[in-house]
Every structure is written in structure tokens, then in C-alpha cells.
Image (cartoon, grey):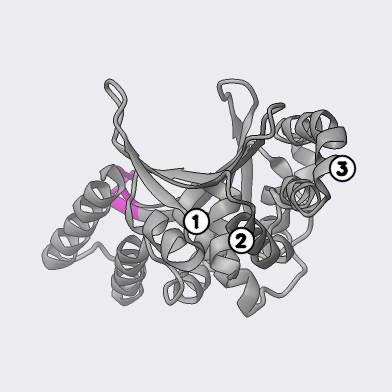
Amino acid sequence: MEYFAGLFDAEGYVSLLKDGHFVIGTEMANEEAPALFQEKFGGKIYERKRNKRKKTWHWVISTNREPAINFLNQIIQYSIIKQPQLLLLKNYLEDSQLGRRENRDQVSHQISMLKNPSLFTKSELDVPTNMIPTSEFWKWLAGFLDGDGNLCVYEYQGTKSKIFDSWIGFFNSHAQVIRYIKKRLNGSITSVKGCKHPVWRLVLCQKDSEFACESLLPHLVVKKEQCRLIIEFLNIKKTKIREQSYSFDQVNQIREIINQIKHLNSL
């Protein structure tokens, strides 16, 4: 269940309109994860193709209170970002018909306001990494990475030779989720300008990247192959003798890994 909560924190949305219509859903460019949501919680899947954009798959529960409450009851305790929104909708749906009618406008407004990220400074997010990741955390993080994460191996020219490196990054406009991860995995934090709000990014340090890949691999769905390829790259990197260049075969292996990851990330 932690995996679903992590993916919903990354790609999920909750809405309650003033006419009483509600929607719980996810939107992804990958169809595998929405299919898992449908298999686990019911609901429907829709395809959408916008001009000059990738086709996306939407998993949605709407109108029917029973499957919605079932989903909310299972996911709330594991959610980090969306938990307040989910709890508001759960309490609303479990209220009486009169209570829902009287509180609808207020709850709709509260859910809408919670979608706006809280303001943080970089120093507030750069907290000490002093918490030991649990198995529950890795499952949640796998879902979050499948939604709002990226895995990359890249090549650049050093002073004497080609250099190969890798990174694992997590992105979100809700800064508190970046701080949540940073408490458990060390890395550098930056922000980039988003459409409405800054998007915060945490890139894991090299030491924690290998640890993270090995811990995440059993739980990933969408980015499992990218994770496996990074582990393959890190194993090649370990065999390289310090101060010596990569062999011809190693360079070709790594470049093939780079191309495979780029292809998978583009899908």
C-alpha cells in the first residue's frame, strides 16, 4: 500500500466541486501504474492525447462513494503530501447527506487551498540526514520515484579523459516531501522555476545512490529497468582501477546503458 501512496503523492489529485461531484485520480504517461490502481481499487481508466504532448492514462474514481471511501481508508495513513486533502474528502464522504450539503463549499475550498504548496527556503529543507530508512519508506519512495523521480547516467569531458557518472533525483513543488526524503537520504537540494510555483529537486549523493537503487529495485514498477541499469553502471564503475581510464569495452557498455536509460525515460 505504501507504493500506491507514494505514486499518488507524486501523480494523484483530489477534487470536490460545489455541485457535489468529486474526483480521485492519477495521470501518467505510463499505462502500467494506472492499471495497477484499477486492479487494486476499481475505478476507470481513460486515455487522453493532447496536441504535441504525450498520450496519458488517467485512473479515476468519481461519483460512487463506496469505492472512493475504500481507497481513502487504505491510502491515507501512508500518504505524505496528499494526506490532508484525502482526509478532508474522506470525512466529507462519510458525513450524512445533510452534513455534506451544509459543508460542501467549505470542504471544496479547503481541498483547493491545500493544492497550493507551502513556502519554504532552501535552508529549511536542507535538514540533517539522521533517520534510518525503513522498508515502508522504500516502498513509498519507489512509488514516488515512479511518478516524480528520474534516474540518469551521463558522460562528460574531464581534464584528461571522459568521465561517467549517475544520479537519482526527486522533484516536487511541495517542499515538505523533499524534506521528508532528505531526512533519510543525503543529497543536494536546488529549485527550478515552475509554471506557478518553484519545483524543488533533491539529487542523492553518490554514496546513497547505490544504497537507494538496491533498496528501491524490488518495489519499482515504471522505472525498474532504469534502476537496474544504474546498478549495472555502478558495478562497472567499481571495477575501474583508480586513476586509470575505462577500458574500450567498459566505455561501450556504459554508453549503451546511457542510451537505454534515455530511451526508457522518453517513453
Majority secondary structure in the magenta region? strand
Residue ID at (20%, 51%): 259
Residue in the foreground of this view, choosing between 154 and 54: 54
Q: Secondary structure at mark 2?
A: helix
User: Which one is nearer the viewer's eye here, 256 or 68?
Assistant: 68
**Residue in the image at 75% along x and 36% along y:** 111
Label 3: state its secondary structure: helix
Residue 217 lies, with reference to residue 32, above or below; the image says: below
Please identify the quadrant where the N terminus is shown.
bottom right
The label number, if any, that marks residue 145 in the structure image: 1
Residue drawn at x 77%, y 68% is 130
Visible in this render: residue 206?
no
Q: In the drawing, does residue 179 fall left or right of residue 4?
A: right
Tell me the CA gap for discs 1 and 2: 21 Å
Would residue 5 be visible to someone looking at this image? yes
In front here: 162 or 41? 41
Query: Which quarter of the rendering shows the C terminus?
Result: top left
Q: Mark 1 and mark 3: span between their CA atoms?
A: 38 Å
